[in-house]
Amino acid sequence: MHLSSLDTRPFNKFVEMELERDNLYNSFTALDEPKEISEAWVTFAESCSKNLSAISNLAGMAVERIYDVYQDMSKGNDNPLALHELLYGDFPNQIMALNKFELQLGVLTYVYSQVRNRGVFNHTPSTSQYTYYILAKESIDRIVYRILTDALPEVEISGLTPTPTKNDLLDVIMPLVQLENVKRLLPIYDNLPDSSTDPRVLAKKGEYDYLQGVTLLTHIIDISRKTSQDFWWADPISELSILNHAKEHFEKVINLWNEAPESVGNKGLAIKMDFIPIVDAQSSVSMVQHFKLLAESALEGGELGHASRYYNKALSEYKIACKILKKSESSQSKSLLAEIQAEETELKILRTITDLALKYTEIVDKLYDQDNEGALASCMEITELLKQIEGAGSLPYIYGISVTYSSAASMINELLTQEHANLNVIDRLISQFYFPLKAMGTALSEVPLSHVIVNHDDPLISYNEFIELDERLYYLEKAIELLPQFISEKDQQRNKIHALRYYVKSVIAENKIYLFSDYNIVLDLILRARAHYFAKKAEQSISAFKKGEKELKNLINDRMIATKISGMVTESSLISLGLQSAYKNNKRTLMKEIITLIYESDTLPEFIADSVEAQFKETTDFHGLLDLILLDTQELLAANVNVSIKGNDINFDFVRRREVFIPAIKTLTEAVECIILGELFAKNNKMTRAEGSYNRANKMFFEVSESMGKIMNYLEDQKELPQFLYQASLFCRENASSIRDRRKRQDPPYSDIISALDYLVLKL
């Protein structure tokens, strides 16, 4: 497995992915028209497909290595990765959790590949990209193969993180397998006589489109929503693309079955009555969610005008969805209608208060311009708007803002009719809003951030507490954002509430690690990257404060450091799995195959040595993985900050040992390769090259012997390793001398040398 498709270190890439999605919605003014949305999402989907495929590679190499260890343990061999098992649970549970994760990634990659190739709103891109679509299919096929070959272990369900069973995997896979089986028959049906007119053939051909539509509408969307809860994002535009795709298949089957009513009865009509309304309504709801995200992004940026516009667009889509569902008689339509109507009330309140904020800003502008009649007219409009916010009492903090808006309207009417000076009216109006803002500022100061810490003993308790806290902060945030822009202190409090919410979101992401990734090191790393990303967002928000908020700044800074450190530790653990997998299944296998060839052959073709040398140079992924681990190691030592990861402090003795092991592994690997090449060149009578290879091996073994001697205390049960490596150096020097003098060479101690390399790699 290689990481080249990530372009950068996994932890950094996951942070960049969060930023990419964030930047997408920050460009809210360019995401409100169909063509703009489609163009943006085609680009976004291609990036997501690529990144998801790379994450799947990470999960795949983790499964590969853990499965190797599991098999070794099943045969009674020792467990060489005790630390890893301690951090991530027993191996059967890890294998099953990672397989389920791979499966989810495969489905998500399929979704974004389809968005990339199909576009949205009938705006199809000019080019197609099937690479990641094929990789998604292959990842799903790998899991099917593991199930069919009984390569997955039985697991015991225990702990907070639910462990998937084989049946759980089959629940996801079987609809996809069934769909593929039906799809394979389509060319056969098309080649039958009268395939376009025979009612029975038309009925069979329609089954594929029907099944595809149902699978997209239920199965694929359900998986997408589940992944958005676990580790991905809610992505209403991608969901809209899935719905459009499903509708195309439903319309196709309706047309087919309408041509053969005697074979399928009223099935076509049933689809039209039951499925099409759901698809159309869900499509409008997806647009509602999209415009809500745009409105929230606009509010966060202080753009009340844009927020009002997007709330209005969202409500328009709500009306469309409700109108469709009210006409449908199906129980699913009624259930969906009740669900969206409950959400519509809150949306109306937010839209109305946004409009009120804009109206009050308009009044202040008119008062400055001495346009008292215009100001009074705007007051009348405010009176009408206030009638539309019934029900705001159910929304914490926002209700208080609605009351303030109401009392402010009465005050302005009274002052203007009494012919008070306009500047006096403006001052009174600002004061009217200053008091609730001050109260909300006090509420912000009372948020106990220093106590927002994950409960290691019972993470479910702390998780629920943090979710409740985040919900309260959400309404407080909205209340501050919905104040008029002319209040000078608003931006300061707005930045502070953003910093607080991002801080809490960072802790929630960390808390989710304990609940959802006990057996999944890749998901662990993704959530740690998300925790760091939110900490960075908190730091960006609080940086607006040039003075003050020292305690909050320190807390955020400490959190940025802690999330980065824990991310580096997790990243190096994950890459170590990949390194061990690459070593065992590629590097080591190649070495042993060539060694066997040397032993079994008296003479070899001349091209063999050069061919093997080229193969050794091609295994660059192994060295690349070592470089990534070394980067993490050096950064950890430079930071010299200890953090608790799942209740375990960082073992800095282990980190220091690893800093020496990594270059030693590189050098020792090259030394073994030089011995192999020395033997190959000698068999081909290329004595100068053979001698040179052995001389290089001599220097390399001596170099590693010296480095190991400096960390003798860290070598545990391998204290004799430096001496052995020194002896290997002497052996190489002697064989080089024998080659030069045309004397008989000694047979290399391949088994012992590779065992030494095994030790360094498996203890990394």
Image (cartoon, rainbow, N blue to C red):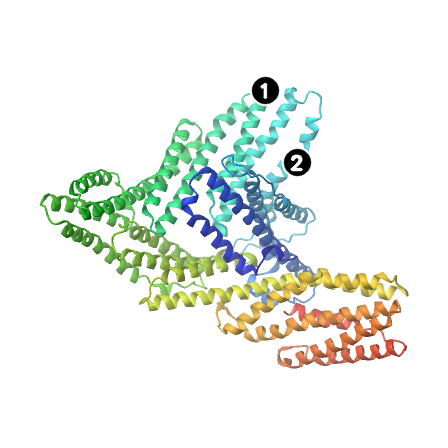
Label 1 sits on what residue type?
Answer: Glu
Q: In this picture, is 407 found above or below 651? A: above
Report whether 674 appears left or right of 194.
right
Of 280 and 200, the residue lying toward us = 280
The x and y percentages for residue 218 are 52, 38
- Residue 259's label in the rendered image is 1
Q: Quadrant of the C terminus?
A: bottom right
Report whether 200 appears left or right of 125.
right
Residue with the most extreme left position: 418
Q: Tell me if I can see residue 164 in this picture.
A: no
The x and y percentages for residue 146 are 67, 49
- Residue 181's label in the rendered image is 2
The x and y percentages for residue 468 are 36, 54
Q: Quadrant of the N terminus?
A: bottom right
Report whether 595 appears left or right of 470.
right
* Residue drawn 47% across the image and 54% down it: 19
Label 2 sits on what residue type?
Answer: Asn
The x and y percentages for residue 568 are 53, 65
